[in-house]
Image: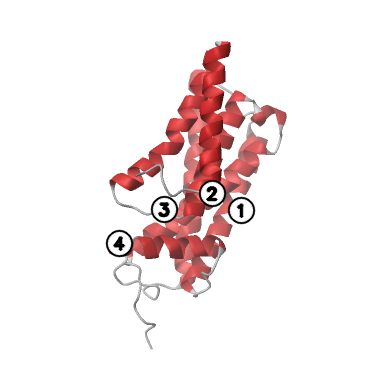
Amino acid sequence: MFYRGHSWLVYAIWLTLIGAFCFALYERNWQMGFVAISTLVASMVPAFVADRYELRLPVAFFAGLVLFLFATLFLGEAFDFYEKIWWWDVVLHATSAIGFGLVGVIIALVMFEGDRYAAPPWAIGLIGFTFAVTIGVLWEVFEYFMDISLGLSMQKSGLDDTMLDMIANAGGGLVSAWAGYAYLRGRDKSGLSGMISEFVRGNKWYFPKSDNKKRR
């Protein structure tokens, strides 16, 4: 089932959110309760979808995803970490870019059916980098339109905030690009490249050529 086989960190965060939700109900803090239960549901959806479509997510990747949602939705919104800790938003932009970059690398590998030698390693890394940066740009555009249409302040200090976010996105994209490059070069024993390798091994039906020998 979707709630089994995860990292202890995932279960710790889920228990924290359940506890926060119950405490919020006791205190009649409806906003806190809404944020807690929304974060809990959002963090469970990827596992449910993966289970529904028989996808096997790397344990470390899913734990990182749950931690990211916890930091973004719960700590960022309920405890106002975005305002209290100046670097909070920057770190989250960088980590989200790493995640999206890995997704971009996986999408490229699916297109080549897992064949490590169908494209140069630098090209796959570039796809991952481009995917991460593109998502980051689209998010900044979304923030801009939300600010001008609804009078919000998602961009905070305007140009400075946007540029810092874009730099963080580019940095995270470079990290994931290197992970894709390292995977294709056979350096996939641990870390982010190890996550890519674990995902490919666990979902062989999407990568029928992943065991191909190197062409001479």
Q: Which mark is residue 171?
A: 1
Query: Secondary structure under badge 4?
Result: helix
Q: Position of residue 138 (x, y in %)?
A: 47, 40
Q: Residues within 10 Å of mark 4 (few under 14, many from 20)?
A: some
Viewer-side label of 4, 1 = 4
**x and y, in percent, of residue 137 in the image:** 51, 43
Measured Cα–Cα span from mark 2 to mark 4: 24 Å
Taking the spot 51% from the left edge, 28% from the top edge, the residue there is 18
Residue that badge 3 annotates: 57
Q: Which quadrant is home to the C terminus?
A: bottom left
Q: Earlier in the sequence, mark 3 or mark 1?
A: 3
Labelled pair 2, 1 in contact (Cβ < 8 Å): yes
N-terminal of the pair, mark 2 or mark 1, is: 2
> Which residue lies under the disc numbered 4?
206
Q: Is residue 93 above or below residue 191?
A: above
Q: CA distance from mark 3 to mark 1?
A: 24 Å
Circle 3/circle 1 CB separation < 8 Å: no
Q: Which residue is mark 2?
A: 97
Q: Nearer the viewer, mark 2 or mark 4?
A: 4
In the displayed orientation, state which residue is furthest to the bottom.
216
Element under disc 3: loop
Chain-order first, disc 2 or disc 4: 2
Q: How many marks?
A: 4
Q: Hey, which quadrant is residue 96 in on the image?
A: top right
